Amino acid sequence: MGYSTGLVCRVCGKRYEESPLYVCEDCFGPLEVTYDYEFLGRKFSPETISRGPKSMWRYWPLLPLQGEPKVGLEVGFTPLFHAKRLGDALGLKRLFIKNDAVNHPTLSFKDRVVAVSVSKAVEFGFDTVACASTGNLANSLAAQATAAGLRSLIFIPADIEEAKIVGTSVYGTEVVAVRGNYDQVNRLCSEVASQYQWAFVNINLRPYYSEGSKTFAFEIAEQLGWQCPDHIVIPVAGCSLLTKIWKGLTELEKLGWIPKNKARLYAAQPSGCSPVATAVKNGWDTIKPVKPNTIAKSLAIGNPADGLFGLRAIRQSGGYAEDVSDREIIEGILLLAKTEGVFTETAGGVVVAATRKLVRQGRIGKDDLTVLAITGNGLKTQDALVGATRRPSTIDPTLEDFVALEEQKERRQRENVSLG
Ligand SMILES: *Cc1c(COP(=O)(O)O)cnc(C)c1O
């Protein structure tokens, strides 16, 4: 028995019974899940939650399932750690990394939203799940649908990273590569969804899907000792993660499990696809869609579905947004790897590089408790680093060759010193 009480329109407030519905019949506004917070707050507390499983399911009372989860039992409760060396490099004393690059089973935060939406699809009785994806969602849905014994169909832009294509096809799922960008793939999927009785997890199950993102915020708060950080820097594509981090922290405040939701939220986007950052910087109340052109393919959504709600959350929180060039993205990936030993994908590079800008602008202070949302793994976007890392020195298997290599290195260092 769950604690969700149905769906509500985020625009006009009309209420609906729980069903695979995602837009309001009256005003076409997006729907979201509601809960009986009062009942829930009487039955649960930080203490009872802390005794739960070491996965995102410790927060099940705040997730929209009526029964047990059907897949992804191991998803979530990823590390949050003090990134001292990266903090030194950026000038921040209390910098933390929330590391979903090591999430299970497919190394990105999308494992959270898929675990919820596939479980919900099973509750609703669907036998086929589908999605429109920029890559990480594809990986996670393919893996978890397979594990649940469901048929899956996955639609991707044809030009995403090879590792993300192989990492989807390997599960035996049906992958449809569409000649077009994500926004075109998504539009196609909306049309397909209206003709076939399939659960498109990020379209007709979107209200349930997006709830999974709240667990990212819940974990941050719990891992900080049920405290709210001062700042969270978040990579933004469709703006669902950012919007739901805000909802999650607001819920924790409402339940009294954190003293106050004081977090300022920052959207981090690649300059080649920054409709949300552009709106924030210009003070616009609307999002102007763009045509993506960036190496951060996981963030290449030109017309973000939750953009307006994201804008609202950013403003309400007192946060801001920044965008960074492809070159800065690569620098961000390298900086995180070389300081903390964490290899993130392009989206993580966007977050690190945007944080550097926000610190320089004085928006994030050196003593503030700051969390970076690292949402994906670098092994999937190695193409982006071609030419950016040093090639290994190649030698024959003789001691002589190795000694020569070391001597060459010492000579170079001496020359650099005398030149310098
Ligand atoms: C999907 C994705 C995001 C952004 O998610 P939205 O909820 O669409 O804004 C961030 N990082 C990674 C690695 C992703 O795959």
Image (spheres, rainbow, N blue to C red):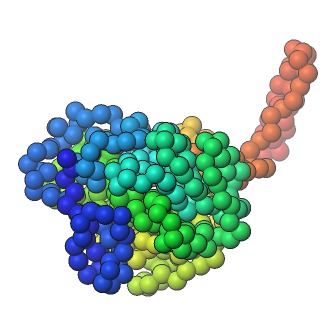
Q: Position of residue 203 (x, y in %)?
A: 45, 66
Q: Is residue 10 visible?
A: yes
Left/right placement of residue 135 relative to residue 203 reads right
Above or below, 193 against 52 in this view is: below
At 64% across and 54% down in the image, what residue appears? 175
Along the horizontal axis of the image, is 171 left or right of 268?
right
Q: Work out which residue is located at the far top of the displayed protein and give it.
A: 399
Residue at point 41% right, 47% down? 115
Does residue 273 show up? no
Q: Give how far across and how far down residue 370 sits, in percent.
A: 38, 53
**366, 189: nearer the viewer:** 189
Residue at 74% across / 44% down in the picture?
389
Q: Residue 160 is drawn in which quadrant?
A: bottom right
Residue closest to the eye, 347 or 358: 347
Give the tally of numbered discs.
Answer: 0
Does 226 sit left or right of 349 as displayed? left
Decide: is 372 above or below 225.
below
When asked about the image quadrant of residue 156, the answer is bottom right
Which of these two is toward me, 31 or 346? 31
Residue in view at x 77 percent, y 41 percent: 390
Where's residue 70, x and y in %?
A: 37, 42
- The spot of residue 276 in percent (x, y) is 48, 74
- Please state if 17 lies on the left or on the right of 206 as rendered: left
